[in-house]
Amino acid sequence: MALFAMFLWGSAIPMIKTTYKVLGITSKDPGSMILVAGYRFFLAGFFVIFYKFLFEEKSDRKDDFSLIFYIISTVVQITVAYIFYYNGLALISGVHSSIIQSTNFLMVLIFAHILIRDDKFNLKKVICVILGIIATLLSNVGGKVDGVVSLRGEVFIIMSTALNALGTVIMKKWGSKENTYNISIFQFIFGGFLLIIMGLFTHQHPLIFNFKAIVLLIYGSFISSTAFVIWYMLLRYQKASNVGAYKMFIPIFGAFLSVIILKDKFNIYLFVALFLTSFATTFLHSDLMEGKN
């Protein structure tokens, strides 16, 4: 089940880039990208409502509700993050994007160090951050080798990854008492709605959804909602450290699916970068060097 969730998340990049191709969206039409993202997340919210009725247990039903927290977390994790993400994906390869995204753990460590009092850096975390920085530099070199690098695209994906990491830390610090299903439903529907409004006012060309585009849109919504539910259920019954180690497979699936579906090139620099981020993720969630300061 954990690997299936990682596969779903990893398949998001080729799904998005294929959607652009089917709908004829180019990097010069960011409004259409934002509109597609909005449709995807708005629909994902209704998938989560369905899963809530199927899987929610009484112990999950918390009454805490902070509208300000819900709005802030939504704007950070969904609206702004995916404006950068969807635009960045149009500018660099899927493999390159996967590797940059895999440094999410690095940014979580940094934001947690800043915002959470009892989650400071130790020697193990410093090693992981160094590995993540090296991997990011190597992925940049690898992109230049294949001639598909875009500084703007890289910056957009880094910004998206950083915002996602910040949202994770915000959830950990202030959202632990919130109902997980409710906040996900709110984030998907409200965040998607904001993206749709912005997309409708800024897109340059009308989007005509044929059967293939509709299937891709539904699959994108299925990815977001189903991977979330699986991940939450695994965290309920397994140790977070055990489950967290599986995140190393997200960039692996993303990179290889990009090679297979998008025909992206994969060179030695990108391979080493992917190995380093996967190793760092596994190392971070292992019992090695625990307690080392």
Image (spheres, rainbow, N blue to C red):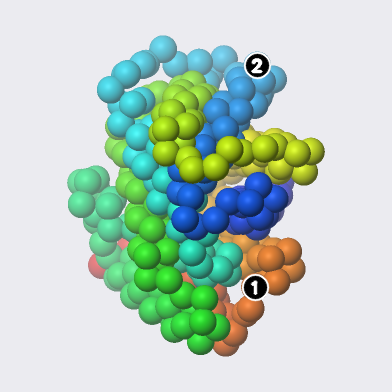
Q: Quadrant of residue 88?
A: bottom left
Q: Looking at the picture, does residue 141 appear above or below residue 248?
A: below
Q: Quadrant of residue 227?
A: top right
**Label 2: which residue?**
53
Q: Is residue 96 left or right of residue 43?
A: left
Position in image of residue 90 (x %, y %): 52, 59
The residue shown at (52%, 76%) is 148
The residue shown at (30%, 31%) is 72
Position in image of residue 271 (x %, y %): 57, 80
Q: Looking at the picture, does residue 13 appear above or below residue 237?
A: below
The residue shown at (37%, 70%) is 151
SS category of the residue bearing label 2: helix
**Label 1: which residue?**
264
SS category of the residue bearing label 1: loop
Q: Nearer the viewer, mark 2 or mark 1?
A: 1
- Give the residue type that dot 1 points to: Asp
Between 84 and 55, the one lying in front of the other is: 84
Considering every residue shown, the one lying at the far top of the view is 63
Q: Is residue 233 left or right of residue 110?
A: right
User: Of the residues under marks 2 and 1, which one precedes in the sequence?
Assistant: 2
Circle 2/circle 1 CB separation < 8 Å: no
Position in image of residue 4 (x %, y %): 71, 49
- Between the C-alphas of marks 2 and 1, the distance is 40 Å
Between 53 and 127, the one lying in front of the other is: 53
